[in-house]
Image (cartoon, grey):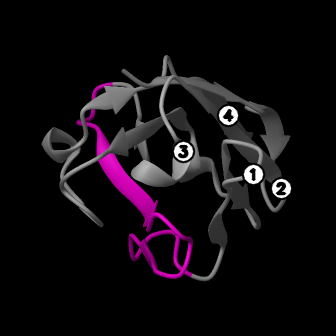
């Protein structure tokens, strides 16, 4: 089992930055890939970014490419999502997720473990 706890969300003005953290426990952190997803009110959960077990490979949704950076510190059992130049359309609940078997995956269904989410609100 893997437990994930997100933090770092909040209210920020457009153009600002936030760094989300995902603290993991319950299994060796480097056993799994980490993904970030988000869900805005009335919309489906959407892929944001994912990072490989060692952090070597990363992928981003086109909507965040160049603005968001995913990373991980396996020694600290923590994943991160640095979000810069935030836009009002980035407003959503952000979820950290982990998968042991699927690798770098875009689909939410490929992830076995999920955090509770953290709210990010970007004002215009």
Residue 27 location (% of width, % of height): 48, 31
Q: Is residue 74 above or below residue 11?
A: below
What element does badge 3 sit on? helix
Asked whether, in this view, residue 94 is left or right of residue 105, the answer is right
What element does badge 1 sit on? loop
The residue positioned 42% from the left and 50% from the top of the image is 31
Give the mark toward the camera: 3 or 4.
3
Residue 95 location (% of width, % of height): 47, 34
| Secondary structure mainly formed by the magenta segment | loop
Towards the viewer: 9 or 115: 115
Q: CA distance from mark 4 to mark 1?
A: 30 Å
Q: Which mark is residue 75?
A: 1
Name the residue beneath numbered marker 2: 17
> Reading the chain from its start, which is encountered first: label 3 or label 4?
3
Q: CA distance from mark 2 to mark 1?
A: 25 Å
Towards the viewer: 36 or 124: 36
Q: Are marks 2 and 1 in contact (CB under 8 Å)?
A: no
Give the mark toward the camera: 4 or 1.
1
Assess disc 2: are there few (<14), some (14-19) or many (≥20) residues with their C-alpha within 10 Å of its C-alpha: some
Q: Which mark is residue 91?
A: none
Residue 49 magenta-drawn?
yes
What element does badge 2 sit on? loop
Give the mark toward the camera: 2 or 3.
3
> Reading the chain from its start, which is encountered first: label 2 or label 1?
2
Residue 116 magenta-drawn?
no
Name the residue beneath numbered marker 3: 29
The residue positioned 27% from the left and 34% from the top of the image is 43
Asked whether, in this view, residue 54 is left or right of residue 109, the answer is right
Please report the bounds of the magenta region as a residue range.
42-65
Q: CA distance from mark 4 to mark 2?
A: 11 Å
The residue positioned 51% from the left and 35% from the top of the image is 92
């Amino acid at each position: 089992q893997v437990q994930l706890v997100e933090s770092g969300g909040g209210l920020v003005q457009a153009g600002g930055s936030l760094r989300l953290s995902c603290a993991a426990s319950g299994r060796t952190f480097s056993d799994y890939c980490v993904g970030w997803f988000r869900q805005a009110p009335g919309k489906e959960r959407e892929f944001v970014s994912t990072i490989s077990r060692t952090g070597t490979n990363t992928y981003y949704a086109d909507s965040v490419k160049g603005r968001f950076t995913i990373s991980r510190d396996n020694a600290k059992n923590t994943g991160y999502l640095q979000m810069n130049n935030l836009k009002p359309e980035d407003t959503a609940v952000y979820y950290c997720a982990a998968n042991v078997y699927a690798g770098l995956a875009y689909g939410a269904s490929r992830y076995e473990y999920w955090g509770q989410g953290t709210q990010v609100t970007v004002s215009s």
